[in-house]
Image: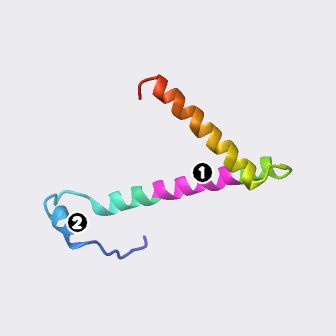
Amino acid sequence: MEEIKLKISEDLMEELKKFPDLKLSEIVERALRKEIEERKKTELLLTALNKILKGSKMTDKDALKLGEEIKEKMWKRYEAEGW
């Protein structure tokens, strides 16, 4: 098994000292695995989107305009629902 070294702030270290039963290596490993999985999902989504949009004639300006229209409509919907 490989080892890694990490630096943490003094205030976090003080908090950690309050919980000596924490298994830091397990916590860090879970966090790293989660981050890697999230990045893999993002890569897959971006790859799929690039394939879908490959032949698109929509410009960046068109996409921004569409995004603004969607945001405005969603805002109105949330207001109507009492958000």
Crowd tier of the residue under label 2, counting other residues whose Cα lies within 10 Å: few below 14, some 14–19, many 20 or above: few
Give amino acid for label 2. Leu
Which image quarter holds the C terminus? top left
The residue that appears at 16% across and 67% down in the rendered structure is: 14
Which mark, residue 81?
A: none
Residue closest to the eye, 5 or 44: 44
Residue 13 occupies quadrant: bottom left
Does the segment drawn in magenta span residue 59? Answer: no
The residue that appears at 67% across and 50% down in the rendered structure is: 64
Q: Magenta stretch? A: 33-46
Report x, y in % for residue 35: 48, 57
The residue that appears at 64% across and 39% down in the rendered structure is: 69
Report x, y in % for residue 32: 44, 60
Does the segment drawn in magenta span residue 43? Answer: yes
Q: Which label's residue is closer to the chain start, 2 or 1?
A: 2
User: Which residue is denoted by mark 1 in the rendering?
Assistant: 41
Left or right: residue 59 versus residue 8 is right
User: Which residue is denoted by mark 2 in the rendering?
Assistant: 12
Left or right: residue 29 versus residue 38 is left
